[in-house]
Image: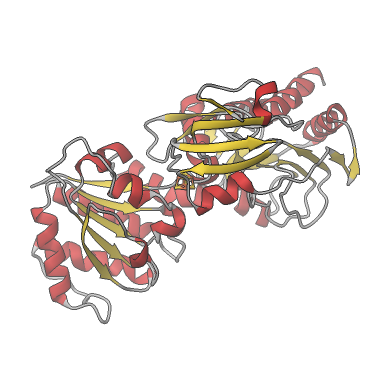
Amino acid sequence: MPGTQQGIATLADTDKLNHDFVTCPFCGLHCDDLSVASNGGKLTVTKNGCEKAKAGFEHDVPSAVPQIGGKDATLPEAIAEAAARLNQSRQPLIGGLGTDVEGMRAVLALADRAGGVVDHALSAAMSRNMGVLQTKGWFMSTLTETRNRADLLIIVGVDLAAEHPRFFERIASPAEAMFDGDADKRTVVLIGCGGNAKSGVKGGRIGDVIEIACQAEEIPPLLGALRAVLKDVPHTAPPPAGIPAATLTDLAGRMKAASYGVAVWAPHALTFADADLAVQMVSDIVRDMNKTTRFVGLSLSGNDGAQSAASVCSWQTGFPLRVSFASGAPDYDPYRHDVARMLKAGEGDLLVWISSFGPVPVAPPETDLPMIVIGSPNIKLARAPDVFIPVGTPGLDHGGRLVRCDSVVSLPLKRLRSTPLPRLTEVALNIEAALQRT
Ligand code: SF4
């Protein structure tokens, strides 16, 4: 019978164990209550988790070895080749950044040494938040505060049951909350969340569920109309077609009556043109509300290690992501150091792509540039990269830490199985060390 172990398993132990209190790395909530059985390298979620977690933990990982130009190589050979290519590069672009805290620390050391630009695959989404934070500041909540205090949740532009499947179970409708009685039944309002979102709102603490359906691009004008109603001022444009004024009046009344209202969004789900306006408008409404009551925002992001990458970059350079080390010092510019833009504009001469979270690791953008891929073995690539180094997934193949979407805590990751795959930290630091010698 497999044993139960709550601490970090040793290498020899990991092949047949039940692991409790496992942190899930597959979305920014990083739920830390999963149980996962490990048997001969095969992982099975046995308690808690969700479909997304099951897909992430339970998918088969093909065996893979490093490659140079599509041909098998040893790890030291691949590291030496990667270092040689970085050494020749005048402007390396280091993107993807799908890794954990320790991995990101190593990537920054490498970027610093190589004079590279660092940018996460989800930076465009994160910058929707960053622009608001930098220009006006904001009032934000955490998952814990929301779980304990919220009596009204307004969810904007995201089907949470699909994007962050356990949000309602763990945050909106938890089995226990610190201030029971204050939030017996929570009202949930869905604004432009898509046709399936309402069916995913479940839980014993959920009270009224109000759906205000609109197209994604109608969210900013709808929020503008709601803001006018809240402030009791005329609004030049009517709310989007089909939404009665009485609906907004009713919502404004509920917001004013709430003792702890929370506006929830996920920046990566706001994919329409000018989506920044939606975050801006939510933040403005929250600010207005705080003149008379308590109201906060809650941004759910952090998939693919995005929050870890952004946090580590801020801790170590003083800037959020999209930083260049080309001048020898960190240089932050969210427009110029956008790797996708730089590739389209013909800037840069080498792409280093990092992507270690499955089950479908984020693939690199199309480019004719020479490419080094350091990623999960099942990453789908349109062409053989010049150097490919397969690495393990944080929280499955090795321990580590990930910063949660609300950026107030980092969660410990466990090694759940033994694997020959190296961790990205080791690979990046070895490439950096090889660069130092050249
Ligand atoms: S909600 Fe997210 S973090 Fe929680 S188990 Fe599902 S995929 Fe993992």
The residue nearer to you, when weighing 240 against 213, is 213
Q: What residue appears at the point 10 percent right and 55 percent down from the top-left corner?
A: 256
The residue nearer to you, when weighing 76 against 353, is 76
Spot occupied by residue 344 in the image (x, y as percentages of width and height): 66, 57
Q: Quadrant of the C terminus?
A: top right
Figure quadrant of residue 424: top right
Q: Quadrant of the N terminus?
A: top right
Q: What residue appears at the point 39 percent right and 47 percent down from the top-left corner?
A: 300
Q: Decide: is 214 above or below 368.
A: below
Residue 395 in view (yes/no):
yes
Spot occupied by residue 374 in the image (x, y as percentages of width and height): 72, 39
Horizontal arrangement in the rendering, residue 72 relative to residue 372 (left or right): right
Q: What residue appears at the point 80 percent right and 30 percent down from the top-left corner?
A: 83
Q: What colour scheme was applied to this rendering of the protein?
A: secondary structure
Q: Which residue lies furthest to the top in this view?
A: 437
Q: Decide: is 380 above or below 14.
A: below
Q: Decide: is 390 above or below 12.
A: below
Q: How many marks?
A: 0
Figure quadrant of residue 393: top right
Residue 11 in view (yes/no):
no
Horizontal arrangement in the rendering, residue 148 relative to residue 255 (left or right): right
Spot occupied by residue 314 in the image (x, y as percentages of width and height): 47, 30
Q: What residue appears at the point 73 percent right and 29 percent down from the top-left corner?
A: 422
Q: Residue furthest front?
A: 1
The residue nearer to you, when weighing 376 against 124, is 376
Figure quadrant of residue 44: top right
Spot occupied by residue 113 in the image (x, y as percentages of width and height): 68, 25
The residue nearer to you, when weighing 327 against 437, is 437
